[in-house]
Amino acid sequence: MTSIKSNFELLVASESTAYTPNVRHYNSQGELYLFEFVLKQYGFLEIASRRYDCAAGSYFMIPPDADDNKYWAAPGVIQEKIFFICRGTLVRALLESYGLEKSYLVPNARELVKYFYNMLILTKQSGAGKNREAALVFHKFIQGAQAVVYPDDEPPLPPTVKKLQLILDAHLEKKLNFAAISREITYSQAYIVRLFKRHLGVTPYEYLLQRRVETAQLLLRYSTLSIKEIAERLVFSDQYHFSNCFRKRLGVSPSRFRNPESASDPE
């Protein structure tokens, strides 16, 4: 099995410090994206002829085409940061799909720091699966960033619904025991289902299937996993169940989605 190196490659991730002198992100290879999260203290970023204030809890991005850039800590302080550098066609595709290609500085993004630490863990690994896992983490990071950059005007979800949504999102690749979850949330299963559907328009089970199909699209397009392996990874009962769910939601089979010009469609 090969990695998705040509579409997404995690090159490095590390913790760092920044001082007052200006630092420039040199992009000699012309394809590197830098994402850097400010953990402590205050600093600045200059990019695309604009200056940004980088406070703790924010992150900034420097894309390949932004040669005129520099970043530095405020006078007298030492910024503590964590960063990762990546490249590949998936990076640009996701940034453009989620409208984030010009979001150089994203403030108030503390909930996204977990993805930087995930990259830090992954960069220490080796093997064909490293970049595949990093690509999935990056997709989740971009989804989270979009929610920060483009908050909707709808009222926040009730705590019970939000808690269940987070649990479901954490079980895309795990079996789900809904009875145990309803005991944890301390409401009856029937009540939770009604409450969830009232606010999100779908039942918890339908939401979970929808999120798994979204992840399957990423794996089909940017990994070399077989359709059977993707079905197993996303906890479908078998390949045929996966294919039926996929076709029902997208109107096309997994094999046709992966190879649109393919004449055969055996599923």
Image (cartoon, rainbow, N blue to C red):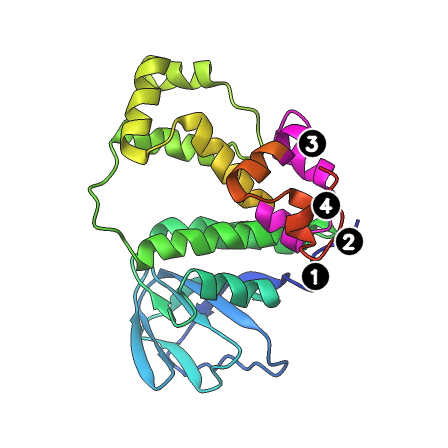
Which dot marks residue 225?
Answer: 4
Report whether residue 82 is seen: no
Check contact, mark 1 vs mark 4: CB within 8 A: no
- Measured as percent of width and height from the top left, residue 12 is found at 61, 64
- Measured as percent of width and height from the top left, residue 73 is found at 35, 74
Quadrant (top left, top right, bottom left, bottom right) of the C terminus: top right
Q: Image point 38% across, 14% down: which residue?
A: 183
- Measured as percent of width and height from the top left, residue 115 is found at 48, 51
Amino acid type assigned to the residue bearing label 3 in the image: Gln
Q: Image point 78% across, 53% down: which residue?
A: 2
Instruction: Decide which of tag 2 and tag 4 comes sooner along the chain.
Output: 2
- Give the distance between the C-alpha atoms of the residues marked 1 and 4, in whole angstroms: 13 Å
Q: Is residue 136 above or below residue 171?
A: below
Q: Which numbered mark, 1 or 4, is in the foreground of this view?
A: 4
Instruction: Decide which of tag 3 and tag 4 comes sooner along the chain.
Output: 4
- Give the distance between the C-alpha atoms of the residues marked 2 and 4, in whole angstroms: 9 Å
Instruction: Decide which of tag 3 and tag 1 comes sooner along the chain.
Output: 1
Residue corresponding to mark 1: 5
- Give the distance between the C-alpha atoms of the residues marked 3 and 4, in whole angstroms: 13 Å
- In the depicted view, which residue is nearer to us: 132 or 220? 220
Amino acid type assigned to the residue bearing label 1 in the image: Lys
Q: Which numbered mark, 3 or 4, is in the foreground of this view?
A: 3
Residue corresponding to mark 2: 2
- Give the distance between the C-alpha atoms of the residues marked 3 and 2, in whole angstroms: 21 Å
Q: Is residue 83 magenta?
A: no
Amino acid type assigned to the residue bearing label 2 in the image: Thr
Check contact, mark 3 vs mark 1: CB within 8 A: no
